[in-house]
Image: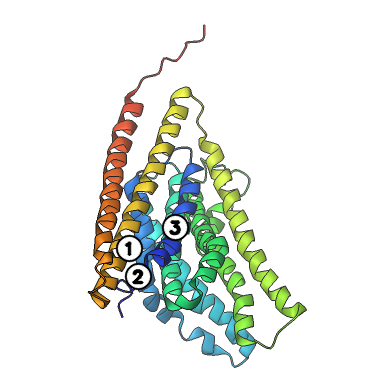
């Protein structure tokens, strides 16, 4: 059965809502949020990038088979079978979106695009997991929303942050004390997220392949996975603060613009959530009616889904228009700057 046809409303919302919430929190930390269109493009392309995983994995398919040792095979699978393909396709999305803006654009834009790509990937992956295990989707939704979804977003943030540092390193102070930063930073764009992802997956793969591990050993492996997961999120938060600190608003006009943009982004996410919920509700209602046409009560509820879609669409259109009009107005405003005598 097609995944879209079997999409239960609640499961769909549970899969996507955590990613949208984390993305909003990251955007709210940005002092000068970028164009909404590129952020949504990064989110959708991040979700679509899962379709490229087969090609990315094919590049590394032979590596885990280079050794007969089961432990090393598992390590190589974690690095080249899972982490490297997933992070590479996300990095390609970040680079593709970030190149749509000039090199002089706010470096925080790359961080936001990275978060959007990682969270789009996580939202689609979340949806697949929840639909694959409908008998335990509630537990999966809670566990993945607490750690896995923010973890994927954090990996995107780290890749986006190092892309920003590579493109604007001197402006961010990255090359002042370290003459080798211009070499190390581009390597970290790939190595940092791949290494952190592999370290997070390795304890979980160990538990999957060795279910006989119980007691203290099992708790130690579970704790190691959580340590790398939350440690990655903490590193991403540190990089966000490091880059954002160079672009804090210093004038009343910039603070006013920031407050307006954050309000617009909140409404934009509300519109997106309303549109998604309405679409999922409509599909679910039609599916139930199709499987049992005599239960016409589901058709009575269809207008609610259509109404939610319309409300979401209106919010998206209005807030997008307000963003561009407000941005142009704030840019053309000429604040009076007192001249020091």
Quadrant for the N terminus in the image: bottom left
Q: Secondary structure at mark 1?
A: helix
Q: Is residue 16 left or right of residue 296?
A: right
Residues packed near mark 3 inside 10 Å, few (<14), some (14 to 19) or many (20 plus): some
Mark 1 touches mark 2? (CB < 8 Å): yes
Q: Secondary structure at mark 2?
A: loop
- The colour style of the image is rainbow
Residue 263 in the image: x percent, y percent?
Answer: 42, 37
Q: Which residue is mark 1?
A: 280
Residue 150 in the image: x percent, y percent?
Answer: 53, 59
Mark toward the viewer: 3 or 2: 2
* Residue at image coords 35%, 57%: 277
Q: Which residue is mark 3?
A: 17
Would residue 96 be visible to someone looking at this image?
A: no
Mark 3 touches mark 1? (CB < 8 Å): no
Residues packed near mark 1 inside 10 Å, few (<14), some (14 to 19) or many (20 plus): many
| 239 versus 244 height, above or below | below
Q: Nearer the viewer, residue 155 or 135?
A: 135
Q: Which mark is residue 194?
A: none
């Amino acid at each position: 059965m097609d995944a879209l046809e079997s999409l239960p409303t609640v499961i769909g919302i549970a899969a996507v809502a955590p990613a949208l919430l984390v993305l909003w929190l990251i955007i709210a930390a940005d002092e000068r949020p970028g164009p909404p269109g590129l952020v949504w493009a990064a989110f959708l392309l991040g979700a679509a990038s899962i379709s490229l995983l087969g090609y990315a994995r094919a590049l590394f398919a032979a590596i885990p088979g280079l050794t007969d040792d089961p432990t090393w095979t598992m390590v190589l699978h974690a690095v080249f079978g899972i982490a490297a393909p997933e992070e590479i396709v996300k990095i390609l999305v970040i680079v593709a979106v970030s190149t749509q803006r000039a090199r002089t654009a706010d470096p925080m834009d790359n961080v936001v695009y990275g978060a959007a790509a990682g969270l789009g990937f996580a939202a689609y992956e979340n949806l697949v997991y929840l639909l694959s295990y409908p008998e335990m989707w509630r537990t999966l939704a809670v566990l993945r929303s607490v750690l896995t979804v923010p973890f994927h977003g954090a990996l995107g943030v780290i890749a986006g942050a190092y892309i920003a540092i590579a493109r604007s390193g001197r402006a961010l102070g990255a090359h002042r004390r370290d003459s080798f930063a211009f070499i190390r930073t581009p390597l970290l764009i790939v190595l940092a997220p791949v290494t952190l992802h592999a370290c997070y997956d390795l304890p979980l793969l160990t538990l999957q392949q060795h279910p006989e591990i119980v007691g203290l050993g099992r708790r130690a492996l579970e704790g190691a996975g959580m340590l790398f997961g939350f440690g990655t999120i903490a590193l991403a938060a540190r990089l966000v603060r490091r880059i954002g600190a160079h672009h804090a608003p210093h004038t009343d006009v910039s603070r006013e613009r920031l407050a307006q943009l954050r309000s617009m982004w909140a409404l934009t996410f509300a519109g997106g959530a309303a549109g998604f919920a309405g679409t999922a509700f409509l599909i679910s209602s039609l599916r139930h009616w199709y499987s049992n046409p005599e239960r016409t009560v589901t058709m009575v509820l269809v207008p609610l889904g259509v109404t939610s879609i319309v409300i979401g669409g209106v919010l998206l259109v209005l807030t997008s228009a307000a963003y561009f009009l407000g941005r142009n107005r704030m840019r053309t405003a000429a604040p009076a700057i007192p001249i020091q005598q």
